Amino acid sequence: MNELKASGKPFDISKQSVWEAYVKVRSNKGAAGVDAVSMEEFEKDLKNNLYRIWNQCRVA
């Protein structure tokens, strides 16, 4: 039988893609998400926050 096997995290995403997504959200005056973190709060630790997003999305 053909079985799908989980190969780690669901997405293979580049750091550049995360950066481009952030730029789009920022240009659209992005609002707080389900975590209620504002753009201003997110940007206080931008480098680490973008890294955490990338790290959670990349394939292990």
Image (tube, rainbow, N blue to C red):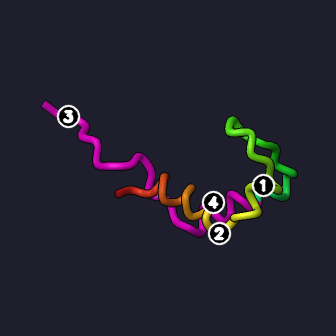
Mark nearest the camera among 3 and 2 is 2
Q: Earlier in the sequence, mark 4 or mark 3?
A: 3
Q: Is residue 42 left or right of residue 12?
A: right
Q: Mark 1 and mark 2 in contact (Cβ < 8 Å)?
A: no
Q: Nearer the viewer, residue 5 or 49?
A: 49
Q: Secondary structure at mark 1?
A: helix
Secondary structure category for the residue under label 2: helix
Residue drawn at x 48%, y 53% is 56
Q: CA distance from mark 3 to mark 2?
A: 38 Å
Where in the figure is residue 16, as x and y percent of width and height? Answer: 60, 69
Pair 2/1: label in front: 1
**Quadrant (top left/top right/bottom left/bottom right) for the C terminus:** bottom left
Q: Is residue 7 magenta?
A: yes
Residue 49 marker:
4
Instruction: Find the distance from the CA under tag 4 to the CA under tag 2.
Output: 6 Å
List the residue tagged with mark 1. Answer: 41
Q: Nearer the viewer, residue 4 or 7?
A: 7
Image position of 12 (left or right of 52) = left
Residue stretch rendered in magenta on the structure:
1-23
Q: Tell me the residue that label 2 is attached to.
A: 47
For residue 6, what is the image quadrant? top left
Q: Amino acid at mark 1?
A: Glu
Which badge, 3 or 1, comes first in the chain's sequence? 3
Q: Mark 4 or 3, which is nearer the eye?
A: 4
Q: Is the residue 2 above or below the residue 15 in the image?
A: above
Answer with mark 1 or mark 4, whichever residue precedes in sequence: 1
Image quadrant holding the N terminus, namely top left
